[in-house]
Image (cartoon, rainbow, N blue to C red):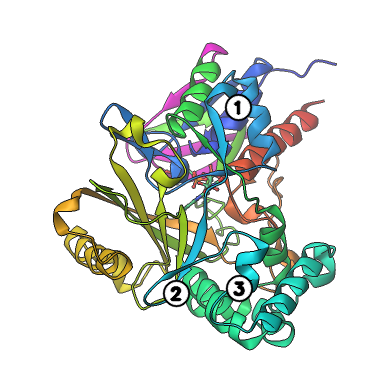
Amino acid sequence: MRNKRVNIGIVGGGITGLVSAYELTKLGHRVTVIEKESELGGLAGTFRYGDTYLEKFYHHFFSGDMHARKMISELSLSDKLVYTKPKSGVYTTGDIAPYSSIVDFCKYPSGSLFGNIKSNAKLFQLSLTDWKKVDGVYTNQFFKDKLSPETYEAVWRPLLENKFGDKANNISLAWFQARIKSRSSKLGYLNGSNKILIDGLTKTTSNQGGKVLLGTKIISYDKKDNNFILKSSSQNFQFSHLITALSPFSINTKGKPSMQKKYMSAISVVCILKEPLTKFYWTNLNDKSPFLALIEHTNMVDKEQYNNKNIVYLGIYTNDESEIMSKGIDYFQMEAVKLFKNINPNFKEKWLEDIFLFKAENAQHIADVDYYKNLPQIKSSTKNLYQGSLGHIYPYDRGVDKAIWLGKEISKKLLNDLL
Ligand SMILES: Cc1cc2nc3c(=O)[nH]c(=O)nc-3n(C[C@H](O)[C@H](O)[C@H](O)COP(=O)(O)OP(=O)(O)OC[C@H]3O[C@@H](n4cnc5c(N)ncnc54)[C@H](O)[C@@H]3O)c2cc1C
């Protein structure tokens, strides 16, 4: 049976909102995507670099990202998706220890061979466990009890603290289990950046009759006579159905605000270097630098497309209110140079040709032990209001693949209610 056609507003032009718009316009619904920024893409957004584009925040796909692969194929972009097997490492002080294969994990220098083997056997066993059985277990407690203390101290404790700050001791093992389960040694990248996917979704949606409004921040909504009235600073909009595809998962209503989950903010520093810095794509930084990871993008992607420059990302997760969120590019440049000198003694300041700084609030939800009990629902208690955010994704970590899944789930639920 065909659905009746309705007038749908989607607040948020990240991947989730764009996928919902794409799915709903396919069936002839009137859809308007409203985005506060001047560009679409949200956390997966890009910036122009030379003749091409780069992600503001480092991105790759895993082999098992089937929602993304299917969508990329549907948009006839599969020839742009290239998978490689780049190397990973862990940096403490002095050197980067390889951390890509079972042999690397076992030979990791800070632990004994026996301790490392035991830790990896436990992690493998964990990856086979049903996540519901370990939901509510504290990740750090599991690490302390089951892994060797050296492996925990050298690898996992810094990783948890870098990602979740003072909430690191509250993280659910179900989140961690899903995270290690979805990792793959092969990583994919869309040549031309996420912009290819964002443009593909936007163009098809617009061909299907959808509209996009940029630079329009929705500040509140109200429901009157079965319609949603949305307010921006300059105009009002009216829709019969509303989707909020943003984090935290709701804009203010006139009544009480919806429950909101706690989030971490992200900072990304993109350095353009004349020379390569390391041989690794991903290096966890377990030293004293403010950065959590160094991602040498051009050790995953052919640098020819960037005029043979080397692209290095430095990432940080932090609290919205933390002092580092207010720091400017000079501070990050100074810290980047210090780190590069430590990591590669041949590094010269003149290698650094350009530097870009990006910050985003609400970039990672904190999947604590109580998370599943309070998992937000897509279909809200208000009729015809649907919500999707990073916080709706659990136990898996958020990602473009999961945002595509979420965008589809939202549209499925809405369409189902129209039957
Ligand atoms: C540092 C970092 C690294 C990452 N690396 C990877 C990776 O390697 N692989 C991967 O798959 N994923 C990665 N991700 C995650 C991925 O980018 C996100 O999961 C995905 O893009 C989320 O999409 P979304 O649409 O759900 O949310 P968002 O991207 O947050 O989109 C929400 C949109 O809503 C808009 N908005 C908010 N409030 C309003 C308002 N009031 N009015 C109008 N518009 C509003 C925002 O501007 C934004 O465009 C990474 C994220 C970060 C931060």
Task: Name the residue type under label 2.
Answer: Asn
Q: Is residue 375 magenta?
A: no
Closer to the eye: label 2 or 1: 2
Q: Quadrant of the C terminus?
A: top right
**SS class, disc 1:** helix
The percent position of residue 55, horizontal first and vertical second, equals 40, 41
Closer to the eye: label 2 or 3: 3
Task: Name the residue type under label 1.
Answer: Ile
**SS class, disc 2:** loop
- Residue drawn 60% across the image and 31% down it: 19
Which range of residues does the magenta coloring cover?
A: 207-234
Say which label, 2 or 3, has the lower sequence index. 3
| Image side of residue 210 versus residue 2, left or right | left
Say which label, 2 or 1, has the lower sequence index. 1
Q: Name the quadrant containing residue 34.
A: top left
Q: Is residue 385 visible?
A: no
Question: What label sits on residue 72 in the rendered view?
Answer: 1
Question: What label sits on residue 286 in the rendered view?
Answer: 2
What residue is pinned by disc 3? 107
**SS class, disc 3:** helix
- Mark 2 in CB contact with mark 1 (< 8 angstroms): no
Closer to the eye: label 3 or 1: 3
| Image side of residue 30 versus residue 54, left or right | right
